Image (cartoon, grey):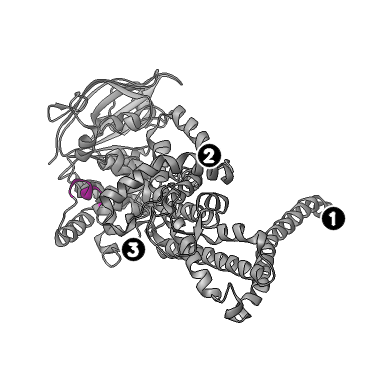
Amino acid sequence: MSKRIEVKDLNVYYGKFKAVEDVSLTIEPRTVTAFIGPSGCGKSTFLRTLNRMHEVIPGARVEGEVMIDGKNLYDADVDPVLVRRQVGMVFQRPNPFPTMSIADNVLAGVKLNNNKMSKSDAEHLVEKSLKGANLWKEVKDRLNLPGSGLSGGQQQRLCIARAIAVSPEVILMDEPCSALDPISTLAIEDLIDELKAKYTIVIVTHNMQQASRVSDKTAFFNIAGTGEPGKLIEFDDTTTIFENPHVQATEDYISGRFG
Amino acid sequence: MAIEVQESTQAKAPGRMGDKVFSTSSLVAGSLILAVLAAVAIFLVAQSLPAFLADPADVNDGQGFWTYVIPLVFGTIWAAALALVIALPFAIGIALFISHFAPRKLAQGLGYVIDLLAAVPSVVFGLWGITVLAPAVQPFYSWLVDNLGWIPLFAGPVSGTGRSILTVAVVLAVMILPIITALSREIFLQTPRLHEEAALALGATRWEMIKVAVLPFGRPGIISATMLGLGRALGETMAVAMVLSPSVIISFALIQSQNPTTIAANIALNFPEAHDLGVNVLIATGLILFLITLLVNSLARMVINRRKAFSGAN
């Protein structure tokens, strides 16, 4: 189910502007990896290159390699659409489709792959995915109501259910809790801990406590100044990063001396 | 202390004044539209009454009002519906192309052209229909009758001039295309980026993303745009009056020389020579057109409201 991600010498450009420079790292299967760093350091941009979602932005392009299980995502014969079916994504703001019911939201991705799903299979998948996202108990009596009627935290878990319904190998989360209250945040963090048993998870967060709570490994990104590209400064076990970082900039950042 | 209080209320006063002026003027504007609508409705009803009350034997050579108006109602709805069927797929396609497929420069240019098309007067479209379109499509109509004549819609005998209801529908479609396109484009451009990205991140292709995120989000807007287009098609006078040689019949055949005409065109053609009760009868047909438009719009509202919870407005 889950796969290793190896990134080699990755540069990301928006037009002529180099947004991320020279990132190399390896993400192990069934781990949670957190990306931290100040705003604009390229961590979200880098995250998006892991499922080629950066290509949605006009002018964005990549140099280097991202290998998932030995296969480079940027090989000429790779279809970005298929990449995104393997590598799911959860966004900063909850974005269930407002025109769909809760159940249809969960099935949205699956229906793209396979239109002819029997009703019982569909119901089964909805239940399994919502249970996987710890949302089933809260919504099981209103599966046909619009997803936009849920609270922010529930909507975000619905988005996670939608992402896991297509059985991806990797789940990317771009600041999934930044629009949520502490209780909903806790629910998502507990969920991440459960999902880790099956999926490789990469999470971008501005909340350093969150990074230290949920992740096994942490990558610290930084920029030298405005207009400079973001760089990977340090990548190590989360405990090492937070207790005994090797680079001064990392220590400054996590101890709150800047950023 | 007291002086200070007075000063502070005085300082607020201009703001409240502006508030009052604004709320009053918007109230006047709002009431005005109701007043105009009411005035039109009252005029239509008052002037129609004689036609309804008259002895059927006196109306249009003894036809009676309803026998007279029903073919016109049919023609009006039939022509507008045909125009809509032709225009809607093109309009949505063009709008999607401009909003989601075309390179930005091309999209802008195309947008201008579409808006320009909306500014062409209907007389010009009528002229184009008679002099260019009708002769051009006539051979095609003949071919249709020869090869697909077994379908009642294409039954013969074919019109020799090409001036049939189908030609009118095409002219009307060209006329309503810009308004539907322009509004749909605006709606499609407003699709939240978040929803588009959600679809793409699930592994949707561009077309699937449009199906999952853009079209459902734009649905109420498409319906509203369609209604505006339909309203224009229902009420269109010149283009229809110029292209069709009218006959008062009910027929679904698209390409014969005998075609039903529309209420608006019928009024335009007959009003100059009408007198006495004839004028009242024509105005009464106008009242019927008014009611048709009202009905169509209420239906559209109902369709939109039925799925309000899923509109994404919340």
Label 2: element kind = helix
Residue A63 highlighted magenta (yes or no): no
Q: What crowding class fits label 3: few (fewer than 14 Cα within 10 Å), some (14-19), or many (20 or more)?
A: some
Instruction: Establish if A12 lies above or below B283.
Output: above
Left or right of B38 in this view: B220: left
Kindly identify which numbered label has been placed on residue B117.
Answer: 2
| Mark 2 chain | B
Q: Are marks 2 and 3 on the same chain?
A: no
Numbered disc total? 3
Residue that mark 1 sits on = B6
Kindly identify which numbered label has been placed on residue A145.
Answer: 3
Q: CA distance from mark 1 to mark 3?
A: 55 Å
- Closer mark to the observer between disc 1 and disc 3: 3
Q: Position of residue B207 (x, y in %)?
A: 30, 41
Q: Amino acid at mark 3?
A: Leu
Which of the image's four quarters has the N terminus of chain A? top left
Q: Position of residue B283 (x, y in %)?
A: 63, 67
Q: CA distance from mark 2 to mark 3?
A: 42 Å
Query: Magenta region: which residues?
Result: A108-114
